[in-house]
Amino acid sequence: MDWLRIAAFVLLIVYHIGLMLSPWDWHVNGEEPVEWIVYVLVAMNPWRMMLLFIVSGYATRAVLARAPSIRAFVRSRSARLLLPLIFGVCFVVVPQPWIELRQKLGYAQGLGHFWLHDYFGFGPRDYHTLGLFHLWFVAYIWVYCLVVAIAAALLPEGAQRKAQRWFERALSGWRLVVVPVAWLLIVRFLLMPGASPTNHVATDLPGHLIYLPAFLFGFGLARAEGMWPDILRQRRPALAMMIVGYALLLWRMAGNPGMDWLKPMHQAELGPASLMGWGAILLLLGGAERWWNRDHRWRATLTEAVFPVYLVHQTLIVTIGWWLIRHNLGAGVEFLILILGTAAGCWAFYEAGRRIGWLRPLIGLSRRQARPAGVERPAPPARSTT
């Protein structure tokens, strides 16, 4: 599962680079947007965040299994998530609103003045700057870790085992395809019709109704050895769902390549997006099980680097993109520079951070430098022989 987690965050970087080059409104946009990129973005949009929450739930189960107590788990998760979140909001993401204000509203002050006087609201202003930006995901994961910690503290072990067995039965065989899609349709058509996630953790009911079940699915999957054969068997139905869903979305986009998925979806997109999204998830899980379920000397290092890379990647994309749009190098060259520059910057951020003791916890690493620990599939509980 480590390799799928690494790939999910790499795809997120590619997605955000695509946003910068696309006609969709983002933090920074090129002068000559490339319209065909939206077809790639729409192909990723229905499943990219669900996948991130699934792999995060899977990793959380491994961390909880290693924790000596629920209290220790909460302390560990809070240190590894809240410290980087605060550090990221106060320092790492600051260039993003500054660049956005300069490009879109003609803000004239430098970055230092902006950080000291405007970013935190120390002076009068008529615009909002301080925010989580892409770090909203970290806040959600921390809240969901608290949810599973509370459940683990309140439920006796017997009830937890029953819940795990219920999870495996409820999603066995054909139910693995039908039940999640049905839930997505219920949320999007009945419970929150037409609503999109807001990425504000305190008020985002549409998001929590999708992201929390995805997180819990990953959490349950980490101890459900018997579900993996079902995931592999459902690859053909999953592929058909993904193809049909994407074809319907392309049909909706015909003549309107600028259709913006960053805004609330039209009812006609909700069904195809649900089919395509869960179909892609099952395909990716099956592919990870069949082809990526092996170790490599780079796996542990890349697994450790994922969180620091996530913290800094969007700031790098926005900063590099802002420089590029003033030089008019063409979309192909811009894409290449964005990929190489973001990859190099992310790796430099990780390498520098992991070598400086006091900086390690601020970028989501353990305080002591050690061999990075992966989140391979936790061992199932030992079966009784009596």
Image (cartoon, rainbow, N blue to C red):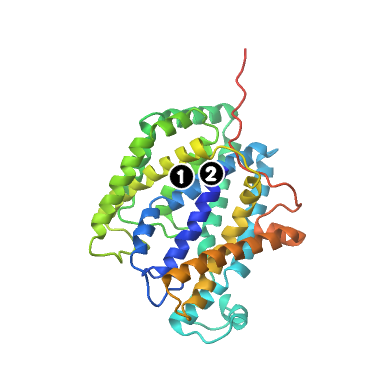
Residue that extends furthest to the top in the rendered view of this protein: 386
The residue under the point 23% across, 60% down is 254
- Residue 144 to residue 65: above or below: below
Q: Residue under circle 2?
A: 57
Image position, residue 206 (x, y; %): 39, 53
Q: Is residue 215 above or below residue 253?
A: above
For the residue carrying disc 1, how many other residues have a C-alpha within 10 Å: few (<14), some (14-19), or many (20+)? many
Q: Quadrant of the C terminus?
A: top right
- Tell me the element at label 1: helix
Front in this rendered view, residue 276 or 367: 276
Q: Which residue is disc 1 drawn over?
A: 214
Q: Tag 1: residue type? A: Ala
User: Residue 380: percent from the left, percent from the top?
Assistant: 59, 29
Residue at 42% x, 40% y: name it: 282
Side (left or right) of 152 relative to 22: right
Residue 126 in view, yes or no? no
Considering every residue shown, the one lying at the far bottom of the view is 108
Report x, y in % for residue 18.
43, 64
Visible residue check, residue 277: yes
> Residue 166, percent across and down?
46, 29
> Residue at 53% across / 77% down in the picture?
98
Quadrant (top left, top right, bottom left, bottom right) of the N terminus: top right
Direction from residue 354 to residue 225 in the image, left or right: left
Considering only order in the chain, which callout, 1 or 2, is on the residue closer to the N terminus?
A: 2
Q: Secondary structure at mark 2?
A: helix
User: Quick one: 373 or 330, which is closer to the camera?
Assistant: 330
Question: How many other residues sit within 10 Å of disc 2, few (<14), some (14-19) or many (≥20)?
Answer: many
The quarter of the displayed image where residue 2 is located: top right
Circles 2 and 1 in contact, beta carbons < 8 Å: yes
Q: For marks 2 and 1, give the CA distance.
A: 8 Å
Q: Amino acid at mark 2?
A: Gly
